[in-house]
Image: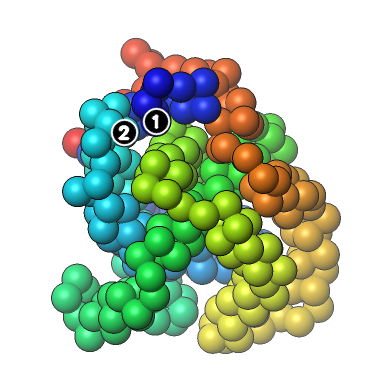
Amino acid sequence: MTIGQDAKSLTPYPKVRRMRFRFGQPEPMTHLFAEGDIPLTHLIAVLSAVFPPGEESFIRSVRKFSGEITDPVLKKRVAGFIGQEAVHGQQHRVLNEQLIRLGFPIVRVFTFDPGARRERALIAVENMVPRQVHLAVTALAEHYTATLAHRVLGTPEIQALPGDPEVLNLLNWHAFEELEHKSVAFDVYRATGGSEVLRIGLMAGSYALTIPVVGLGVFASILSDPRSWRPIKVARQTVKLVRGPIVKGLLLEMRPYMRPGFHPDDIDTGELLERWRAELFGVRGELVDRIG
């Protein structure tokens, strides 16, 4: 059996959907769009800010191996992965434009046009490391997003959190497609001779840095936004966020990646995907009218 056809690669071909979200319509987005929750609003803003350059980097990492992929099944899955990631970046850029207008300076830091100086600098850094390392970083990042996506779509408490409905639509669509292509970069890494030691070692380092890096990003975003300088409220809401359904236990769900022989499809998300495929893209799906 070839990679993409065996029992370790059970997810379907990723389907590219040309989405068109309508942020701020019919009602304009409020500054603290997560219903006044300051740290949650800034967490979403930080994640949205880094998605476009991150997605583009993931695409480049996989393309570096495109000439070495001989399995036609994996080739088709890679094409779907690249298409989905490109649309993710595009739609998060649309949201990021709204966030910049609403007063989130940190989003502007990560917003740059293709070919601009900062993108060229990022590409230069990527080219300084071995391409297998770049791909391994993509594979582990895809595990992060898939784990978070599984939690977002599989936790009713998260779906019930108040906030801007179109932002939630974007996050649900993004989460759904992250689960659709969760094993593609991993399978490219494995098919091209990626080392288990490198894969696990990079995740171990990333795992240790997750809370400090994300926490620093959210803290910096709050500090850069004078309207969010409410220390007592931020402290109280941060404790609630850390103890709530988005964050609590999330790192424990990341840990299986560090097990030798792990594969993303060891975590069964098939039933969740089928349910959300109907909810989002069925005949009466919530996002059918967003497909451009």
Residue 23, relative to residue 101: is it above or below? above
Whether residues under marks 2 and 1 lie with C-beta atoms below 8 angstroms apart, the answer is yes
Quadrant position of the C terminus in the picture: top left
Q: Secondary structure at mark 2?
A: helix
Furthest-top residue in this view: 283
Taking the spot 17% from the left edge, 76% from the top edge, the residue there is 115
Residue 226, relative to residue 43: is it above or below? below
Taking the spot 40% from the left edge, 21% from the top edge, the residue there is 1
Residue beneath label 1, please? Answer: 3
Q: Secondary structure at mark 1?
A: loop
Residue 38 x/y as whole percent: 65, 68
Residue 117, relative to residue 17: is it above or below? below
Residue beneath label 2, please? Answer: 74
Taking the image as shown, residue 290 lies to the left or right of residue 47, namely left
Residue 186, relative to residue 1: is it above or below? below
Structural crowding at the residue carrying mark 1, measured as other residues with C-alpha within 10 Å and reported as few (<14), some (14–19) or many (≥20): many
Structural distance between the alpha carbons of marks 2 and 1: 7 Å
Taking the spot 48% from the left edge, 61% from the top edge, the residue there is 137
| Nearer to us in this view, 234 or 68 | 68
Q: Which of the two discs, 2 and 1, sits closer to the camera?
A: 1
- Quadrant hosting residue 130: bottom left
